[in-house]
Image (spheres, rainbow, N blue to C red):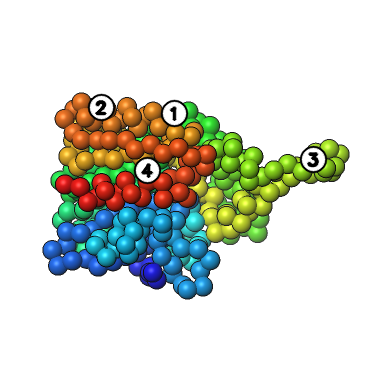
Amino acid sequence: MLVQKQSFRADALTLACGQSIPIEVGYETYGTLNEQKDNAILVSHYFSATSHCAGKYRETDAAPGYWDALIGPGKAVDTNRYFVISTDNLCNVQAFSPDVITTGPASINPKTGKRYGLSFPVVSTKDNMEVQKKLIDSLGIKKLRAVMGPSTGGMIALHWAVNYPDMLQKCIGVITNAQHPAFTSFIALQHAMRAGYMDPHFNNGDYYESENEPVEGLRLAAQMMMVGAFSPLFFERTYPRDSLETEPYCSLDVMSSPEKAMYDVIVERTKTADLNSWIYSCKMLINHDIAHGFESMDDALSRMKAPLLMIPNKQDILHPWQFNAATAQRVNELGGKAEVYAIDSDLGHMAGILQADLFANKVKGFLESN
């Protein structure tokens, strides 16, 4: 399934912080929008991903989109039946990828002709929902068959269920939560932000024209996120220790075998990333709360009309599955309809992205149910 990147622009988007900016984001579609325009499913992506959730841009691409096991002809999210839409987030961390279109700190500020840097306003998960709302409106779609996504994408999906309850029929949140857990906000996200600030070449975010960009700060930030994204068993299996190595025992500057292997992975994965965008995306997740602006979490959850399916992983340390169970229980107590379908994988958080086969049948049945 070959797909093409498209661009959506809006002259003004008023953010949760109160500032208004022009925005441009990339998006792609799969399948065909029917004449009634009632078969659309919106997919939001996770932290370090892009709109590319299925198929390939080019036959020569090494791998398809991150949820290709879930989305496509005859799959759980069947593009023979559904019209799937996926967007790039604001402040997308892969800001320098040729396949990403995003507005964020690496973008040109039309008022100054220079990159925003840290003058870019703080964005929220709800702001990303509002970008999608503008796109959906421009396509003439009045109601979505479903909104879904993993991790950050699931957070955005939950905002849809709360803020536009009449615009979606189903909501699916995979490895996500209604509020970002305080523990992982501090351990993974806040420390990832500080790692960026501490790079000697960071220059208060004004490094774009510099010969020395803060690559080590970016890599350290990515390592902080990677530690929480997988389980300890995954790391032991994937990055085994070489017990015969000698150099790390003789020098503080030489990495041990597992350190070096993980570092090499991070170097490759951050080649098109932007540190400022990484910091902004971390802040977005730390602030995530679907109850923000409402009297209480109960006030927010009581607004949900679409049946909710939460899919956590029992071995996820970033988004513990018990919080999903508590959210679903409260939705049901408030008169809504919610269920939890927990998977159990030692891939940790990333099982919700890399092992979609574990919940594909559940998603298929949920989408087809009345």
Residue 128 % position (x, y)? 33, 49
* Residue at image coords 41%, 59%: 68
For residue 243, the mark is 3
Residue that mark 4 sits on: 174
Marks 3 and 1, how far apart at CA: 37 Å
For residue 308, the mark is none
Residue kind at label 2, given as amino acid type: Arg
The kind of secondary structure element at disc 4 is: strand
* Residue at image coords 29%, 60%: 78
For residue 330, the mark is 2
Residue 118 % position (x, y)? 48, 47
Choose the circle earlier in sequence order: 4 or 2. 4
Q: Residue furthest left?
A: 36
Front position among marks 3 and 1? 3
Is disc 2 surrounded by few (<14), some (14 to 19) or many (20+) residues within 10 Å?
some
Residue that mark 1 sits on: 182
Q: Look at the image and tell me in which quarter the N terminus lies.
A: bottom left
Marks 2 and 3, how far apart at CA: 50 Å
- Visible residue check, residue 192: no
